[in-house]
Image (cartoon, rainbow, N blue to C red):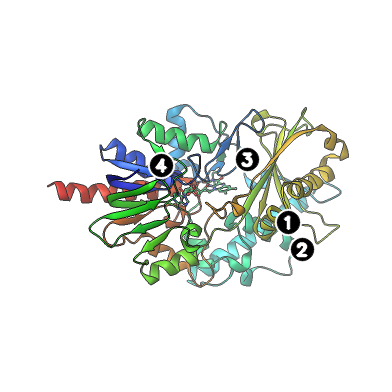
Amino acid sequence: MSQSFDVVVIGAGAAGLAAGARLRAAGVAVAVVEAAERVGGRAHTDVAAFGVPWDKGCHWLHSASVNPFRIAADELGLGYYQRGNRQTRATHLGDRWADAAERQAVWEAIDGAFAAVKHAGEQGRDIAASEVLDTASPWLRMSRHWLALMSATEAERVSTLDYVAYSDTAENYPVEKGYGALVLAVAARAAPDLEVTLGCPVERLDWSGPGVALDTPKGRLSARYAVVAVPTTAIARGRLRFAPDLPPDLAEAFEALPLGSAEKVAFQFDRDVFGVPPVTYVDTIDLRDPSRIPVNFTLNPFGHAMAIAQLGGANAERLVGEGPAAMVDFALAALVDAYGADIRARVLRTATTGWVADPLIGGAYSCALPGKAHMRARLAQVVGDKVFFAGEAVSPHYYSTAHGAHETGLAAADAVLARLARHAA
Ligand SMILES: Cc1cc2nc3c(=O)[nH]c(=O)nc-3n(C[C@H](O)[C@H](O)[C@H](O)COP(=O)(O)OP(=O)(O)OC[C@H]3O[C@@H](n4cnc5c(N)ncnc54)[C@H](O)[C@@H]3O)c2cc1C
């Protein structure tokens, strides 16, 4: 493969697909190259494991009322679930269910932790979230766990100033046929003839000449512009190199916004073992054993006899390192505490994720390190007036989300289209 295009888009996740589809729909000669053997990146609905869809990556339409994927889901007739807020979640304490007062106390502690982190950020303080947590709270473990789910990393590595920049309407709607499938459907609707070259990692992007030249195992591609829509980790770890090197302030920003860990363990049972309504959320924390890390579950998602466990932060990373069996054991132990040992025999199949160990992704979503929040804005800078960056980390207010990634892809495509129009004029 040695070809020339107007634009090459690197990476076919939510951002790259949005950019590629918009450029293709505008009639631009665009190539989209993807290192993996599938499109979607962290938007990945798997059907093979259970015969029904489950999202290995993004699952909730965050900020649903303003989320373009929610609007698209309505237009495409794809269902999502609108009920439930955090306070309706049941909490299991290791050997019994929390009563109403305890549930209230848990939520006050978690909300208090979020409020403290936000307060520090609103004051312009760029410090570690851990510095403002109430370490005397009996529910500290739970607050830290929720913070780890939101930021995919431990409170010591969460910038309070970055955290407060995130915009959230507190509407989180899971997508019935899968958010990953929705991301693909939206791109296919925008540009049904968009082609993506799979198994094609870009190893080096040369921007020294009048355009860009990209080295891949399938040959060299050249183009006038590049949209780089890969995870921050791919650049920080040098899997995609630039020649000349990126400007130092930009290179530093990719290092300052690493992807943390958020992982899932999915169970399929041979019957409904929980006796709860579809999409029931349950949190667990073992008060008997302070060394156990809390874990959250979605039970009976969309009426399927399943449970999906959400793990975050250092615990998620450690368990991925130990392997799928350790992940399953960890999550199943909490389910057994809550629903009894009999459910072990009812497990038909399990599946686990391993985003943090995926060499092409390297984690879950970006979070600025303490003291580095200002560096997120640098990711939107254009290099040499021809290399544009997109992806969840580039989004100033919807970072770490699929719709944030999508919007940055559209913005990069629009910026390229404006330049192409200027040339044509
Ligand atoms: C467990 C988990 C749960 C999540 N839950 C939610 C949620 O509920 N709601 C939500 O909105 N978001 C959620 N997210 C985050 C969301 O999935 C991501 O923010 C979003 O999908 C990122 O899209 P992206 O295009 O920026 O990057 P990616 O999806 O990572 O796409 C980048 C692509 O670049 C490719 N690539 C990497 N290197 C190269 C290279 N050198 N050459 C070519 N291609 C390359 C990768 O293979 C990948 O396909 C979750 C993520 C995870 C992991």
The disc at residue 17 is 4
Query: Ligand 1 closer than 8 Å to the CB at disc 4?
Result: yes
- The kind of residue tagged 1 is Ala
Disc 3 on helix, strand or loop?
loop
Whether residues under marks 1 and 3 lie with C-beta atoms below 8 angstroms apart, the answer is no
Which label lies toward us, 1 or 4?
A: 4
Whether residues under marks 1 and 2 lie with C-beta atoms below 8 angstroms apart, the answer is yes
The disc at residue 105 is 1
The answer to whether residue 280 is visible is: yes
Residue 373, x across and y down, in percent: 47, 67
Residue at horizontal 57 percent and vertical 44 percent from the top: 57
193 shown above or below 165: above
Disc 1 to disc 4, C-alpha distance: 43 Å
Q: Which of marks 1 and 2 is nearer the N terminus?
A: 1
Disc 4 to disc 2, C-alpha distance: 45 Å
Q: Which of marks 4 and 2 is nearer the N terminus?
A: 4
Disc 2 to disc 3, C-alpha distance: 25 Å
In the rendered image, which residue does mark 2 sit on? 138
Disc 1 on helix, strand or loop?
helix
In the rendered image, which residue does mark 3 sit on? 84
Disc 3 to disc 4, C-alpha distance: 31 Å
171 shown above or below 212: above
